[in-house]
Image (cartoon, grey):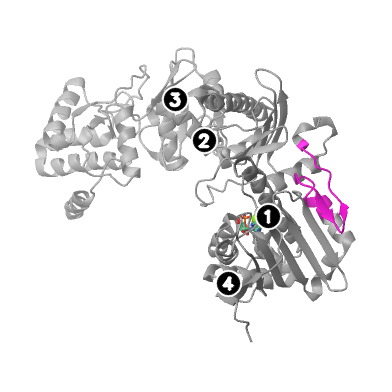
C-alpha cells in the first residue's frame, strides 16, 4: 500500500530494544516527554542562533526563534514546533533511527548491568526523543534543514520496529513534531495540563514558548537573579534543566564577583559520579554565557579538566560576544575567568568540609577521584586541593577519614614526616609487617587504598613542609624505640653473620640484607630502596607490565624473632633445610610487599619444606 516516494527503514537493533521498553514501561511520569521535546527544540534554536553568526545563506532566515506548541483535545494530538536548524533526510534517519543520544546509550548500558526491565531507569536517564512514544502511538516529525535547497521531509513511526520517510511540500525551516496520543495519555491534549508541565520543567528555556497562541514562559536567567529571591526548588529545576539531570544536586554554589572580572556563576555537583559507574569520561558541563547568550555549552578551556564533574553556568559581561578560542587574547580571558571560578569553588568545598563533614565525606567518596587527579597533574591548584584530601589512618577507627591538616595537628613534636602505607584494604595493611615499627613508636600512618593515591602522594611530595614518606621505603630512618626484650635474641655479631649468610644464600635477588630497626613481631620484611622505585613498580604492574623490570630489594630481619634465632643455628646443623627456609622467608616477605612476580618456585619449595616437616615425628 505504500506510495512510491515513501521510504521504509528499520530501526537500529538498540533503538528497537529501547522503544520496546519505553512503550511498555509503566513509568508513571509520562510527562517527561514534553520536557525532552522542548529541550530538543531549544537545542535546535540555539544551534541556529550560532549559525547566524557565521553563515550568510540560511533558509527562512527571518523566522522568529521560538517554540510553538498546540494541543487539540478533539483530535487528541499535541504538536511541538521549533524554527531551529531542522534536519535533512539523512539527519532524520541518523538522529532518530540510530543511537546518537548519549542519554539513551547510558540508559541501555544501565539496563545491561541491571538485567531486567527497570522503569526507574527511564526516570534516571531520560531517553530523549524516544520518550515521545511513552505518550503517543504515532509520532510524525516534519523537518526542513536550514540549508538552502534541501526539501522538507516527514518521518513517521508507531515505534514498532520501523519508520517511514517521505518528502513534503511547503515546510518551513525547523522541526514540527505531531504526537497522536495514546488512550491513557489524552491529558496531554489539554492546554492546562501542558501549561502546568511547561511551568514546572521548562521555565529556563531561553526562547519564547507559545502555547495555543499564548506566550507561557518568562525568559529567566536564574543565575543573574539575587540569591535571596530564588527558591530551592527553582535552583533544583534549573539544575535538572541545564544539566539534563534527574537527581537533586548534592552541592550548589551561586556567586558573583566584580573584580578582576564581572562574573555570575551557578555551579552544581550531582549525586552520582557517572565515571565511577563506568560510563566513560564525562565532558565539561559548565556552560559559558555572556549576558544571557550562550557562547559554549561545553567549554574545554574554561575550567581545569579535573573539574569536569561540575555542572552549571558561568556568565561574564566582560567577554566579547564573538569570542574565539583561536585568538590568544580571548583564550587568556577565558582562562582567567576559569581561575577565579575554580578558586571560589575550592574555597566552597573546604568550607563544606568543615561545616558539614558527613556530607563532605559522602561527596569525597564519590568525587574524591577528581580532586586526586587534580593534585597529581594540576600544579596550579595542588596546594588547595591537597587540603581537601581525606584518608583512613592508623589513629582512626575503620571507615573514618582524616585530612592531612588533622594528621599534622596530631604529630609528635619530634616527628618531621607524614607516613603512609598503600594496600588493598585496612586488614591487609594491619596484618603486614610495615606498620609494626610505627605502632611501636606511636607514629600515625595514613592508609591508602586506591591505586591513584600513591601517585598523588609522590606528586604532592610534602604538606606544610612535612615530607610525605611511604612506610615501605628502605631509606626511611625512624628514631630508636624500646624493643621488647626477648629470650635468646641474636647478638650483634650473630646477626651480622646471619645477614651475610642470607645475602649469599638468596643471591642476586636481594641487594642488601640487614638488621631491621622497624620490625617488632614479624620475622622479616622486604623493602624497595626508595619511594620512587616502589611506586614506579606498582604503576607498571597496574598497567599490566609487571615483569621485566628488576627492582632492587632490601631484606630486613628481626634478630629477636624465633625464626631468625633458629635459622642461625640451623644453618650449621641442617644447612639444606636452612637454605630452603631462608629462601621461603624471603619470598614470603616479597609477597607481603607485592613484589613477587612468579610464585612457581615458591610453591614447589613450600612443598619441599612441608614434606621435610612432616617427616619429623
Ligand atoms: P539528544 O538531544 O540528547 O541528542 P535526543 O534523543 O533527544 O538526544 O535527540 C536525538 C537527536 O535528534 C538530536 O541530537 C538532534 O540531532 C536530533 N533532533 C531531535 N529533535 C530535534 C529538533 N527539534 N531539531 C533538530 N534536530 C533534532
Ligand atoms: Mg534531547
Q: Do the residues labelled 1 and 2 touch (CB within 8 Å)?
A: no
Question: What residue is at 81 percent from the left and 30 percent from the top?
Answer: 226
- Which mark is on residue 16? 4
Can I make out residue 353 in this image? Answer: yes
| Secondary structure of the residue carrying numbered label 3 | helix
Q: Where is residue 583 in the image (x, y as percent from the top left)?
A: 18, 41
Q: Is residue 356 left or right of residue 524?
A: right
| Secondary structure of the residue carrying numbered label 1 | helix
Q: In this view, does 139 lie above or below 287?
A: below
Q: Spatial distance from mark 2 to mark 3, Cα to Cα?
A: 18 Å
Segment colored magenta: 198-222
Question: How many numbered marks does the figure carry?
Answer: 4
Q: Mark 1 CB in 8 Å range of ligand 1?
A: yes
Mark 4 or mark 3: which comes first in sequence?
4
Disc 1 packing (10 Å; few <14; some 14–19; many ≥20): some
Disc 2 packing (10 Å; few <14; some 14–19; many ≥20): some
Mark 4 or mark 2: which comes first in sequence?
4
Q: Mark 1 points at which residue?
A: 40
Q: Position of residue 231 (x, y in %)?
A: 83, 39
Amino acid at each position: 500500500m505504500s506510495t512510491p516516494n515513501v521510504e521504509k527503514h528499520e530501526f537500529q537493533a538498540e533503538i528497537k530494544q529501547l522503544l520496546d521498553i519505553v512503550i511498555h514501561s509503566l513509568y508513571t511520569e509520562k510527562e517527561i516527554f514534553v520536557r525532552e521535546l522542548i529541550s530538543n527544540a531549544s537545542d535546535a534554536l540555539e544551534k541556529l542562533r550560532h549559525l547566524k553568526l557565521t553563515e550568510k545563506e540560511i533558509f527562512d532566515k527571518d523566522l522568529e526563534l521560538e517554540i510553538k506548541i498546540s494541543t487539540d483535545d478533539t483530535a487528541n494530538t499535541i504538536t511541538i514546533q521549533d524554527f531551529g536548524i531542522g534536519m535533512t533526510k539523512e539527519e532524520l534517519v541518523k538522529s532518530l533511527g540510530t543511537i546518537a543520544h548519549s542519554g539513551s546509550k547510558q540508559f541501555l548500558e544501565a539496563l545491561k548491568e541491571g538485567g531486567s526491565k527497570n522503569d526507574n531507569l527511564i526516570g534516571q536517564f531520560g531517553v530523549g526523543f524516544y520518550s515521545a512514544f511513552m505518550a503517543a502511538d504515532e509520532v510524525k516529525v516534519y523537518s526542513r534543514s536550514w540549508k538552502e535547497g534541501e526539501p522538507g521531509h516527514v518521518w513517521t513511526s508507531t515505534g514498532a520496529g520501523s519508520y517511514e520517510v517521505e518528502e513534503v511540500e511547503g515546510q518551513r525551516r525547523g522541526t514540527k513534531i505531531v504526537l497522536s496520543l495514546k488512550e491513557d495519555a489524552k491529558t496531554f491534549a489539554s492546554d492546562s495540563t501542558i501549561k502546568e508541565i511547561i511551568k514546572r520543567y521548562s521555565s529556563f528555556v531561553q526562547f519564547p514558548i507559545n502555547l495555543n497562541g499564548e506566550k507561557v514562559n518568562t525568559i529567566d536567567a536564574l543565575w543573574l537573579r539575587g540569591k535571596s529571591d530564588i527558591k530551592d526548588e527553582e535552583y533544583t529545576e534549573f539544575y535538572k534543566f541545564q544539566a539534563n539531570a534527574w537527581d537533586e544536586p548534592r552541592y550548589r554554589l551561586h556567586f558573583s564577583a566584580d573584580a578582576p572580572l564581572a562574573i555570575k556563576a551557578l555551579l552544581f555537583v550531582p549525586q552520582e559520579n557517572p565515571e565511577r559507574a563506568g560510563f566513560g569520561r564525562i565532558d565539561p558541563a559548565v556552560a559559558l554565557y555572556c549576558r544571557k547568550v550562550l557562547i559554549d555549552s561545553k567549554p574545554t578551556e574554561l575550567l581545569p579538566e579535573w573539574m569536569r564533574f561540575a555542572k552549571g553556568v558561568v556568565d561574564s559581561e566582560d567577554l566579547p560576544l564573538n569570542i574565539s578560542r583561536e585568538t590568544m587574547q580571548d583564550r587568556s580571558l577565558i582562562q582567567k575567568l576559569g581561575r577565579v571560578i575554580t578558586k571560589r569553588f575550592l574555597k566552597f568545598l573546604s568550607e563544606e568540609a568543615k561545616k558539614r563533614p558527613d556530607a563532605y565525606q559522602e561527596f569525597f567518596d564519590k568525587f574524591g577521584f577528581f580532586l586526586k587527579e587534580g593534585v597529581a597533574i594540576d600544579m596550579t591548584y595542588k596546594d588547595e586541593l591537597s587540603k581537601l584530601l581525606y584518608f583512613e589512618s592508623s589513629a582512626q577507627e575503620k571507615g573514618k577519614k582524616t585530612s592531612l591538616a588533622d594528621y599534622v595537628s596530631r604529630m609528635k613534636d619530634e616527628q618531621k614526616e607524614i607516613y603512609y602505607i598503600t594496600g588493598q584494604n585496612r586488614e591487609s595493611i594491619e596484618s603486614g609487617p610495615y606498620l609494626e615499627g610505627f605502632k611501636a613508636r606511636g607514629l600515625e600512618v595514613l592508609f591508602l587504598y586506591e591505586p591513584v593515591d600513591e601517585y598523588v602522594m609522590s606528586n604532592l611530595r610534602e604538606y606544610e613542609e612535612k615530607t610525605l614518606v611511604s612506610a615501605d621505603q628502605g631509606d626511611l630512618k625512624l628514631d630508636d624505640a624500646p624493643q621488647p626484650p626477648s629470650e635468646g635474641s641474636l647478638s650483634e655479631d650473630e646477626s651480622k653473620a646471619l645477614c651475610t649468610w642470607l645475602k649469599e644464600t638468596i643471591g642476586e635477588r636481594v641487594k642488601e640484607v640487614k638488621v631491621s630497626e622497624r620490625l617488632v613481631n614479624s620475622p622479616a620484611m622486604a623493602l624497595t630502596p626508595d619511594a620512587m622505585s616502589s611506586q614506579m613498580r606498582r604503576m607498571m604492574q597496574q598497567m599490566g607490565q609487571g615483569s621485566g623490570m628488576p627492582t632492587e630489594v632490601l631484606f630486613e630481619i628481626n634478630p629477636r624473632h624465633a625464626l631468625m634465632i633458629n635459622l642461625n643455628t640451623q644453618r650449621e646443623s641442617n644447612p639444606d633445610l636452612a637454605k630452603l627456609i631462608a629462601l621461603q622467608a624471603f619470598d614470603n616477605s616479597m609477597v607481603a610487599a607485592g613484589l613477587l612476580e612468579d610464585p612457581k618456585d615458591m610453591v614447589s619449595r613450600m612443598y619441599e619444606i612441608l614434606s621435610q616437616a612432616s617427616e619429623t615425628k
